[in-house]
Image (spheres, grey):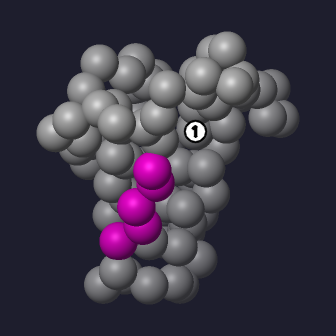
Amino acid sequence: MTDRSGEMRTQGMPDASAIVLAGGKSSRMGSSKAFLRFDDEPIVVHIVRTLSRIFAEIVIVAAPEQELPSLPVRMVRDISEQ
C-alpha cells in the first residue's frame, strides 16, 4: 500500500490517528521549531512522512497564527494562545 506521497506504507494502525502538537511560542528557540531542519527538510515534514507509514490519519495541532508548510494532514488550531 502507498501513502499520499507515493511511498510505501507498512501495516500499522489503520484505525488510529497520530496527533502532532506543533503549537507554542518557541520563545527560547527564537524561531519556529516546526521549521528546524532534519535530513534536509523541516522537521514537521519529516515527522508527518514517518507517521504516515503507520497511521491512517495525522492531525497537527497548531497555534492560532502559526505558519506551517502545506501538508496532507488534518490541521486544527488551538482556540487560545497560552
The answer to whether any part of residue 73 appears in the image is no
Image coordinates for residue 29, horizontal then vertical, percent: 71, 23
> Is residue 39 one of those drawn in magenta?
no
Please state which of residues 11 and 45 is positioned toward the viewer in this rendering: 45
Check the image and name the residue furthest to the left.
79
Residue sitting at 16 percent across and 39 percent down? 79
* Dot 1: element: helix
Please state which of residues 67 and 39 is positioned toward the viewer in this rendering: 67
* Left or right of 34 on screen, residue 43: right
Please state which of residues 62 and 48 is positioned toward the viewer in this rendering: 62
* Amino acid type, mark 1: Val
Magenta residues span: 17-21
Residue sitting at 24 percent across and 41 percent down? 78
* Left or right of 66 on screen, residue 1: right
Q: Picture quarter containing residue 8?
A: bottom right
Residue sitting at 25 percent across and 27 percent down? 64
Looking at the image, residue 16 lies above or below residue 70: below
Image coordinates for residue 20, horizontal then vertical, percent: 46, 54
Looking at the image, residue 37 lies above or below residue 78: above
The answer to whether any part of residue 13 appears in the image is yes
Q: Main secondary structure of the magenta part?
A: strand
Badge 1: residue crowd in 10 Å (few <14, some 14–19, many ≥20): many
Residue sitting at 29 percent across and 18 percent down? 65
Image coordinates for residue 42, horizontal then vertical, percent: 66, 28
What residue sits right under mark 1 in the picture?
A: 44
Numbered disc total: 1
